């Protein structure tokens, strides 16, 4: 018995020693200055290319940016060769805890919150390695799993982007986020997200913030991938949407509105939501309102429709919902082009897991194909998105004092935007997570 106790004590001392050694090594590594060198740099603000480019990193922050920088004593030099450095990309519309290929209705009756949490950890890593170092997560199938994922990332348990999370949808009975879409005899009681009328919505907003949400997602209209009211129809009244914004504002937080139909879009703009997500039926009046009211931003999710049409059936999306999407496709593209012509600032969102996690940059390629310039697409995914979520002082551009969230691609993405689908270097907060471009 005494011998076993001594062995356990010795093992504890050894584990403690190696833990302290590992901690000291990580701390020393973080304190070592890093110089990133690349052929060129896109700052994320739409400025001219910096050629060549050097970025000095101290700890988790950018300390200096230039073409010539004095090398500090003991600095680690990372040479990326003929690559382009960019700020880490930002996606304003993800569902990281949802598994691609599992329809959300199926998930409600065949999976558990633990299942989604584990897949969320996997998807967070995949998304980070694809170059997206900040994401806004728009609500999980199982409420508040995204809050746990954010916490796990922040505490270093799993690698992933910086996350802002919605916690739980706020949806009306029979609306786009109504999880009780089955037989009246089949219930999913854990998903308590339904709120009808301003008072219930106010309580739902408070509940979400109480349980750790960073912002509110309200479903202002019907949806493509659910039953119930048509995507073009406004499902929440003006007063109900306003109630969500009023309460969130009291907390100093934002509201993102899932909104396809024109009436719902305009009601959400009038209420003062921060983003119009999807915006499928965006018409001239809505564009004019967005242009005049610079506090609300349009965030389309265009590539998702291509995936629904090409891969939806094999992944269990009902034909009725695929048909809904097919019906809306031309309107969605027309709305995007309308916003481009008007010169609106357009945020970048993807709706992963409707698309495969890690394919987020394909949204940028599609937007360029539809007429947006490569630089404007990159700015949308960097400094503009940072402005939208109120993080311009921390992320979104390569500037002194901001987090060292940097990515690199081979070649120049201003000449070929699809290079952003081939991210070979990823750094978040001064820590390298991918280094395939590094010249050894």
Image (cartoon, helix red, strand yellow):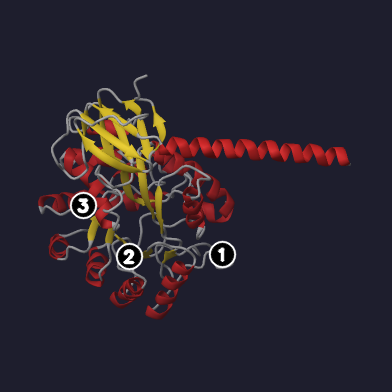
Between residue 344 and residue 40, name the one nearer to us.
40
- Crowding near the residue tagged with mark 3, few <14, some 14–19, many ≥20 C-alpha atoms within 10 Å: many
Residue 228 at x, y percent in the picture: 40, 64
Between residue 27 and residue 231, name the one nearer to us.
27
The residues bearing labels 2 and 3 have C-alpha atoms spaced at a distance of 17 Å
Farthest front residue in view? 73
Instruction: Give the number of callouts.
Output: 3
- Crowding near the residue tagged with mark 2, few <14, some 14–19, many ≥20 C-alpha atoms within 10 Å: many
Q: Which residue is drawn at 35% across and 71% down?
A: 248
Query: Going by the image, does 111 lie left or right of 286?
Result: right
The residues bearing labels 3 and 1 have C-alpha atoms spaced at a distance of 36 Å
Which-is-in-front pick, marks 2 and 3? 2
Which residue position is annotated with label 1? Answer: 190
Q: In this view, does 177 lie above or below 8?
A: below
Which-is-in-front pick, marks 1 and 2? 2
Query: Going by the image, does 362 lie left or right of 29?
Result: left
Which residue position is annotated with label 3? Answer: 346
Q: Residue at x 27, y 60 (%)?
A: 276
Q: In which quarter of the image is the N terminus?
A: top right
Which residue position is annotated with label 2? Answer: 254
């Amino acid at each position: 018995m005494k011998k076993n106790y001594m062995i356990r004590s010795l093992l504890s001392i050894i584990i403690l020693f190696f833990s302290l050694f590992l901690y000291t090594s990580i701390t020393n590594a973080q304190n070592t200055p890093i110089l990133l060198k690349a052929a060129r740099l896109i700052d994320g603000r739409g400025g001219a290319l910096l050629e060549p480019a050097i970025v000095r990193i101290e700890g988790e922050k950018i300390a200096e940016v230039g073409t010539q920088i004095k090398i500090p004593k003991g600095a680690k030099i990372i040479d990326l060769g003929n690559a382009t450095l960019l700020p880490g990309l930002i996606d304003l519309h993800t569902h990281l805890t949802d598994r691609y290929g599992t329809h959300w209705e199926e998930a409600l009756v065949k999976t558990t919150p633990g299942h989604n949490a584990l897949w969320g950890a996997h998807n967070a890593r995949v998304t980070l390695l694809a170059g997206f170092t900040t994401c806004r997560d728009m609500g999980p199938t199982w409420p508040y799993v995204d809050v746990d994922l954010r916490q796990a990332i922040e505490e270093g348990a799993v690698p992933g982007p910086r996350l802002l999370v919605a916690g739980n949808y706020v949806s009306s009975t029979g609306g786009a986020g109504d999880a009780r879409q089955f037989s009246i005899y089949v219930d999913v009681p854990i998903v308590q997200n339904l709120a009808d009328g301003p008072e219930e919505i106010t309580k739902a907003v408070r509940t979400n913030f109480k349980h750790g949400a960073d912002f509110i997602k309200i479903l202002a209209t019907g949806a493509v991938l659910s039953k119930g009211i048509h995507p073009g129809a406004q499902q929440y009244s003006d007063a109900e949407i306003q109630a969500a914004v009023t309460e969130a504002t009291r907390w100093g937080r934002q509201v993102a509105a899932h909104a396809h139909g024109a009436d719902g879009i305009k009601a959400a703009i009038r209420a003062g939501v921060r983003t119009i997500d999807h915006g499928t039926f965006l018409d001239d009046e809505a564009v004019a309102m967005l242009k005049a009211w610079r506090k609300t931003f349009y965030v389309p999710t265009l590539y998702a429709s291509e995936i629904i049409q090409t891969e939806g059936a094999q992944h269990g999306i009902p034909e009725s919902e695929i048909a809904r999407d097919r019906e809306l496709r031309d309107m969605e593209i027309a709305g995007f082009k309308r916003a481009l012509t008007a010169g609106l600032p357009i945020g970048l969102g993807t709706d992963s897991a409707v698309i495969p996690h890690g394919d987020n940059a394909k949204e940028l390629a599609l937007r360029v194909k539809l007429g947006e310039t490569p630089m404007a697409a990159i700015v949308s995914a960097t400094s503009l998105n940072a402005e939208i979520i109120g993080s311009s002082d921390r992320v979104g551009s390569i500037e002194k004092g901001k987090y060292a969230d940097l990515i690199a691609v081979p070649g120049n993405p201003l000449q070929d935007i699809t290079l952003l689908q081939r991210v070979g270097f990823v750094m978040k907060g001064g820590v390298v997570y991918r280094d395939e471009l590094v010249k050894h």
